Image (tube, rainbow, N blue to C red):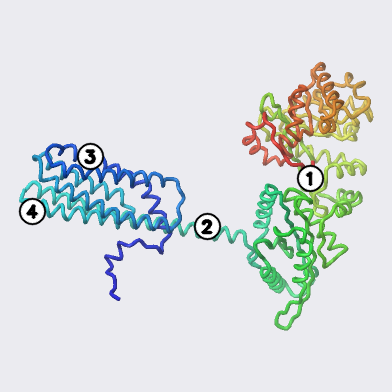
Amino acid sequence: MAKIPAFIRWFAVDGAQPDLALAQFAELRRQIPLLYVLLIVNACALAYTHYGLAPNGLIAPILALVLICAVRLVTWLRRRGVTVDVPFAIAQLRQTIVTAGIVSFAFITWSLCLNGYGGPYEHGHVALFIAITVVGCIFCLMNLPQAALLVTVIVTIPYLVYYLSMGNTVFFAVGVNIFLVTAVMLQVLLNNYRGFTTLVRSRAEMRRLSDENARLAQTDALTGLPNRRYFLVTLASRIATSAAAGSRFAVGVLDLDRFKPINDTHGHLFGDRLLAEVGARLMTVATEDLILARLGGDEFGFVLTGDASDAEAVGQRLCDLISQSYFFEDKRVSIGCSCGVAIFPEAGGSVHELFDRADYALYNSKTSRRGMATLYSAEHESRIRSERAIEDALQSADLDSEMQVHLQPMVNTDLGRVVAVEALARWTNPTLGRVAPDRFIATAERSGLIHMLTLVLLRKALAELDRLPPGISLSFNLSAYDIVDHQTVLAIVAMIRQANVVPSRLVFELTETAVMRNFEVAQDSIMLLRSLGARIAIDDFGTGFSSLGYLHRLTIDKVKIDRSFVSDLDHPSSRNIVASIVGLCRNLELECIVEGVETAKQHAILRKIGCRIFQGYLFGRPMPGSELPAYLANSAAEYAEARPATTAVS
């Protein structure tokens, strides 16, 4: 078979460079419409100047050429913004080369035939038409040099031959000049194309390296399994898709048994080899529906998106697989594996909830069912978070590092903005994980740790207040034990004075129970806090028995209606109580806040009653302070219109 000359091969589009083909098509999609506009306008102008001078048989064909150009123009315009694949792009590039040759041949033939009619001006117009058209084509086709060169050859050679054969010195000189300009432009075009291809290849290489870096960033170097980052991202993605589809999936945490003694006995290098073997075994059973990852140390995790009801059995099979003996030269090593499994959405609706509860189930396996897989249930949490465990953990906890403050917005829907946030305590203990606030605060009160806990949380809350935008105040809850403890109140006052905050932006929330425990002492503490400029709010208003009798004796600024009335708004009695509290606040010139608003229906009823400031999942979950700026930026326009929110532990 005869070898195809290199010159001919050069005109073929290289299908082995997909990135280059896509880049060429993207550039032509912008430039070819300009080419067709240029041809249409120039051809119509040339036909106009020769109308009446040339036979109609030469004028009429241009209408067909113009129509073809117009159709091609519309076709290319429709391709703008459309995503194309590599085969389509290559096919269009090849079609463009062929079309360029046909159209250029038709136009040069027509224009040279037209040159035989008219006077010197008309002849000059033909020469100008050919010159500027070929220059325009070169510019518009510069990212497809095969087409640009084909047009140049088809147009320039007949053009030069024709004008050189005329024997006219002027046209001879014009032809030579155009030839030289065209040759220079072709060289510039080829130089530019080399730079273009280099840039495309560089970008492709950068994308490849970026993808490779992203893959490495999500891969555990020792085992080759996905790492913790990938696991958490995948888990978050599964939560979103499963919540939308109403489906279930499982999360599992695997922890090796007896690994630490082996690692200590044989050394870390041997331990790494063992972990790599564990990873290799897990990789053999990984599928699209069973994603396995190394979470760190000797801990692994999985996400099962298939039949979640079989999740416990899958976890047990993984434990059995890992527990089989390992052989290293002359050593035989046996380890065990325990597993905890949690099911979405029964066990939780967030990454932290699911992971923590799978970890709780793992803890149960490690303590009482070693080597087994355990499915999370409510009794696990109850046992792990028993009163004694919480108290022991509080006694030894590093409160400054373990305690966090989350912020929940309070929204004035008349103003359409957040007017305040409430600081809510969050505790994550290394042993117990996340502990519900109502449990650890009650335990702290009973154990006498509440005063120290309050001061730690207040210091963190004041730091958050210092970062809040102007116009947003911060509410902080004081325990019934705090408000009647003189030393604690004095410590609170000193902390506020030392902090870089405006005290008037600080609101202390007290429950009715806290005030009623020792009214006289509580009243003195309230007056001391108000002397700084801080404001006072009664929380859970309406649930006490003596509050109305004492309300006129207290110097308070706000009242928060208890969530129990909001959840029962379908009953007229609850609506009447809320309306009465709203009227009382209006008469006493107290700001009224409704908490626990979770549905648009509740919001609508409360607005009809006269409520204007709301707090609840409908308007925003408790969130870390770092997330609040994004929440404020993204949600300002949505406050006036209720939006649903899923229930979470507050």
Q: What residue type is labelled 2?
A: Ser
Task: Mark 2 vs mark 1: give the one in front.
Answer: 2
Q: Is mark 3 on a helix, strand or loop?
A: helix
Task: Mark 4 vs mark 3: give the one in front.
Answer: 3
Q: Which of disc 1 and disc 3 is earlier in sequence? A: 3
Can I make out residue 539 in this image? no
Can I make out residue 621 in this image? yes
Q: Which mark is residue 403?
A: 1
Q: Which of disc 2 and disc 4 is earlier in sequence? A: 4
Task: Mark 4 vs mark 2: give the one in front.
Answer: 4
> Mark 3 — residue?
44
Q: How far apart are marks 4 and 2 (CA)?
A: 59 Å
Q: What residue type is labelled 4?
A: Ser
Image side of residue 584 versus residue 37, left or right: right
Q: Residues within 10 Å of mark 2 (few under 14, many from 20)?
A: few
Q: Is mark 4 on a helix, strand or loop?
A: helix
Q: Distance between the residues labelled 4 and 3?
A: 27 Å
Q: What residue type is labelled 3?
A: Cys
Q: Looking at the image, which is closer to me, 427 or 284?
A: 284
Task: Mark 3 vs mark 1: give the one in front.
Answer: 3
Mark 3 and mark 1 residues within 8 Å of each other at the beta carbon: no
Q: Which residue is drawn at 30% across and 66% down?
A: 9
Q: Distance between the residues labelled 2 and 3?
A: 50 Å
Q: Which amino acid does label 1 sit on?
A: Met
When the figure is inspected, residue 528 is found, relative to residue 386, above or below; the finding is above
Q: In which quarter of the image is the N terminus?
A: bottom left
**x and y percentages locating residue 37 in the rendered image:** 30, 42
Q: Quadrant of the C terminus?
A: top right
> Mark 2 — residue?
210
Task: Mark 1 vs mark 4: give the one in front.
Answer: 4
